[in-house]
Image: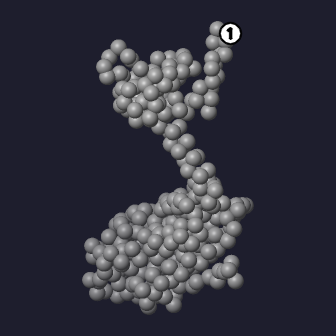
Amino acid sequence: MNSRKRQNGKDEPDINLFRAIEVFMAAAEMQQVTAAASALKMTQSAASQHLKNLETIFGVSLFDRSVRPIALTYAGEMLKRHGYRLLNQIDDLKRDMQHLGASSLPMLQVGLLASLATTLTPGLYNLISREMKVPELILSAGLATDHFAALNDRRLDLAVTSERLHQAPGYSFTPILDEPFFLILPESYTGPVDDINAISRRLSLARFGTTTPVGRRTDQHLQRCRLDLPRAIEADRTAMVMAGVITGECFAILTPTLLIDGVAEGMRLQIHPLPFAPFKRTIQLVNRRDDLGDMPQRIAIESQSILRKAINRHFPKLGPEVIYHEISNPSH
């Protein structure tokens, strides 16, 4: 990118602004123009000219040359802060443009529920990077609310998430599975398991906060059931809720996919049907209706297959309680 500035009624020569900033960043880091020129494989005079051109177009001094090693002025420090961002953006642009020659989709940004990320990542990486030949896969774990905000901002292309928070135009929803909530008790618990009031006299509830979708859903269901249970722990991650249970002082209300990571790490628990009206949540794939072809369907199918195997492996008795939605296979 070239820049031209008019001074004293005359046009200054065009300069390569990005190259000049690259030279400036190298000189700022090394505090020596000679070393920067050598690193960039150019002559010292060429590097000095780039720096002079920058100072001319901005109308400021970028270096204090009266000291050794050279130091940045206030204007130089400001340019350095902007320089990191500019050069990173240029690198991203170069990489994306290079990938276009080999693939129509240079990058795919996928959001995963934090409780599913460890389980899904290896299989989705194989599918997206190796089979679909997408050069760069960017994964982001978080809550369902995080995913919808990121989809709106185009920081995500699709997400394997929970809860249809809104029927927004421009989105596609592919249900993957419906899973019921279960009563989770400490391994050492020996009291009744079919009376929630008796349980709550012995243990306190470890629960998700109402800032999380699963926490809101649980809280709303307890209110519908007219249950006001004593609470000891409120958290925004499954591991913290399960940690409360393994203390032996708490119980929880969780689904199989919320339990996978903890059980895989060796947390020992009792799992029972809820001793009050059942409820469930849906795991689904959400994507903007952009030109992703059959990718969303293929990713939804692979996610369903991975989760089915994980649930059957860790919770063989719970497997029949989970409903797996039929997803049309684009290859058929």
Residue 222 makes an appearance in the image: no
Identify the residue under disc 1.
9
Residue at image x 62%, y 82%? 325
Q: Position of residue 283 (x, y in %)?
A: 56, 74
Q: Give the image quarter of residue 284.
A: bottom right
Please state, as top left, top right, bottom left or bottom right, where the N terminus lies in the image.
top right
Give, as a three-letter code, the residue at label 1.
Answer: Gly
Does residue 198 appear to the left or right of 10 in the view shown?
Answer: left
Q: Is residue 245 above or below residue 210?
A: below
Given residues 313 and 70, the one toward you in this image is: 70
Does residue 54 appear to the left or right of 296 in the view shown?
Answer: left
Given residues 170 and 74, the one toward you in this image is: 74
Q: Position of residue 273 (x, y in %)?
A: 45, 86
Q: Give the image quarter of residue 162.
A: bottom right
Residue at image x 51%, y 66%? 112
Q: Position of residue 324 (x, y in %)?
A: 58, 83
Q: Give the image quarter of residue 105.
A: bottom right
